[in-house]
Image (spheres, rainbow, N blue to C red):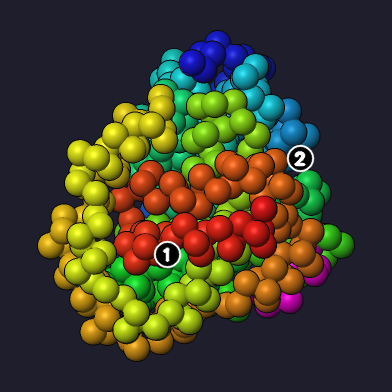
Amino acid sequence: MTNTREYRIVESSAGPAVEQKPHVPPTSMENNIVQHYLDQYADRLETRAIQIERGAIESCYETLERHLDEGPWLVAFDDRTWEAAGSALTDMFERVGQPWVGIRIETQPEYDHPVCTDELVEACQQRMGEEGCTAGVAVGSGTINDTVKMAAHRRGRPMGVVGTAPSMNGYTSGIASILSDGVKTTHPCTAPRVVIADLDRMAEAPERMMASGLADLMSKPVSNSDWAMSARLNDTPHSDEAQAIIERAADSLEGVASGLPDRDRSAIRGLVEALMLSGIAMSVAGTSSPASGGEHLISHYIDMTAHAFDQPDDLHGCQVGVGTLCASYLYRRLHDFDPSDLDIEARVEALPTWEDYESTLRERFDTLFGAVVEHAEPAYPTPDQLHSRLQRLVDQWGVVIDETEETLRTPASLETELRAANAPVRFSDIGVDAERARRAILHAKDIRNRYTILHLCWELGTLETWGEEALDRYA
Ligand SMILES: [Zn+2]
């Protein structure tokens, strides 16, 4: 499906390492809150250093050298990130005598931007082996970071990332999102050992990438509600420590949205900090749940259908932002719901057998069925499970509402903040027409085995009507 040959290797500059490296002054770790958590959870985090500062590119070698292994490093970039940071970084490697091998990631002909595919990871992995690279250095954001993360992980080598855009929260996460046989899947891997965020370089990122980073984090109010709700109804693990980090990340976002269109450095710093903390929280929790709920499923649905059926998509965070508005609307409706209106016996009676539901999924997902069913089946409740979950919901209604309300925000306040950053707020802004948006809201729950507001609404029998209302607002 994806073309394996659509990358090429550029200049290989694997010269011998010089004996004496010029002295690079130690970096002032301006970013104390991020460092604080790195130190506090040093035993649980693979990331050792995060350098967030203006002009970091000029002084990051010392940080990279301290944490990556000696020997040639594989430096991965694309045309844009070469301009943004790759060229300056490798100039510096030349100056200090750091051997490096470059791999330019090209846009595969079937996509309009580089995509992290199995083939790309393999190419990177192979290149690391052939050149005897002791570490990887990704110059970029989502795609390039994920590609090098996974390639280095498979080779058992450490990697660092020099970020070029504050566009997503994967810089510090131990997860890579890879398009595998046309299906976007997340895989656990080793998190970057070093993350470099030069605020001046990041400030040059396209506005939509910054908006995407903010919107990815704006999912917190609903993803945290999903996380707490699932813990309450299903006894899934919840971590107060990760929750505290996520809360701290939200503080960093205070006043950030409106500063992004002006490329205000302190706004970008706040956003970068929050993105790093969000990734750290996922690593501390050992799951992406603190930062990924039903709103992310809506985004993943758009990704899957984009790749499989050649439909438009947008940046991850931009999709998540629109998904967040829908999910927060569903929560509003849930909070207005009167649990005494719920007829549990009738709901259990109405539950399709798995066999019937499986054929529904086959129709809905067509060629994606095989990839979806493995997540959908373990998530599908038996009549007994449904009965006890709904009973627990009714019994603990007040607690569930209080706990989900704690982190939740109104759709209107979320929308105001997204708009301030010029982030998309409607499905039509991200190229998704009303019919596909309807399917995203109604069908996305089956693509992951993670209980969210989408699942709860479906089990209550309200997903269609409330989803339709959300669609009226956000199509
Ligand atoms: Zn995300």
Residue for badge 1: 462
Residue 226 lies in magenta, yes or no?
A: no
Residue extending furthest toward the right = 262
Residue, x 83% and y 60% (percent of image)? 261
Q: The residue under label 1 is which amino acid type? A: Thr
Mark 1 residue crowding within 10 angstroms, few (<14) / some (14–19) / many (20+): some
Q: Position of residue 241 (x, y in %)?
A: 36, 75
Kindly identify the amino acid type of the residue bearing the numbered disc 2: Ala
Estimate how packed mark 2 is, as few (under 14), some (14 to 19) or many (20 or more) residues with alpha carbons within 10 Å: many
Asked whether residue 255 is drawn in magenta, I would say yes
Q: Earlier in the sequence, mark 2 or mark 1?
A: 2
Say which mark, if any, is on residue 84.
2
Image coordinates of residue 328 in percent, x first then y, are 54, 69
Task: Tell me which residue sits at (77%, 64%) in the image.
Answer: 419
In the depicted structure, whether residue 118 falls above or below residue 137: above
Image vertical order of residue 82 relative to residue 425, above or below: above
310 versus 377 height, above or below: above
Span of residues in magenta: 252-260
Q: Is residue 445 left or right of residue 106?
A: left
Q: Which of 261 and 100 lies nearest the eye of the viewer?
A: 261
